Image (spheres, rainbow, N blue to C red):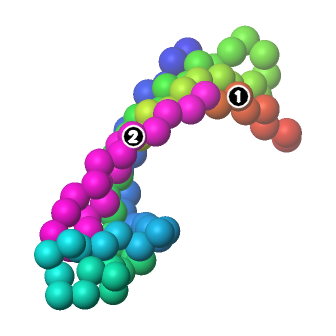
């Protein structure tokens, strides 16, 4: 009664405040507020004995691809879900 669901994805990230490059002639111009990212993670779900009720957790990792740098991030959370039918 345990479900393990891997996931992968990609998208864009809005960075605010804008990152700056101290080596640029005008560092105040920044590197741009939008950068692509790739993500991966895994969900763990426990299907309880109660009808349509699940509980579990989620762990995700992200790599934000900023020109001249790379930002790594992780996130996690707990999930409690009841499905109305």
Residue pictured at 49% horizontal, 68% vertical: 16
The location of residue 79, given as percent across then percent down, is: 64, 31
Main SS category, magenta section: strand
Q: In the drawing, what numbered circle is on residue 80? A: 1
For the N terminus, the quadrant is: top right
Magenta stretch in the rendered image: 61-78
Q: Nearer the viewer, residue 73 or 2?
A: 73
Picture quadrant of residue 30: bottom left
Secondary element under disc 2, as helix, strand or loop, is: strand
Q: Classify 72 as above or below 75.
A: below
Q: Nearer the viewer, residue 76 or 70?
A: 70
Residue pictured at 17% horizontal, 82% vertical: 24
Q: Are marks 1 and 2 in contact (CB under 8 Å)?
A: no
56 in the magenta segment? no
Q: Classify 46 as above or below 61.
A: above
Residue pictured at 73% horizontal, 32% vertical: 81
Query: Could one spot residue 65 in this view of the protein?
Result: yes
Total labels drawn = 2
């Amino acid at each position: 009664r345990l479900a393990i669901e891997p996931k992968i994805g990609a998208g864009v990230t809005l960075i605010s405040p804008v990152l700056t490059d101290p080596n640029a002639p005008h560092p105040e111009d920044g590197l741009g507020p939008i950068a692509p990212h790739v993500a991966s993670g895994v969900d763990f779900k426990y299907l309880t004995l109660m009808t349509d009720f699940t509980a579990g957790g989620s762990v995700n990792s992200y790599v934000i691809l900023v020109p001249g740098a790379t930002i790594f991030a992780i996130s996690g959370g707990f999930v409690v879900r009841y499905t109305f039918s």
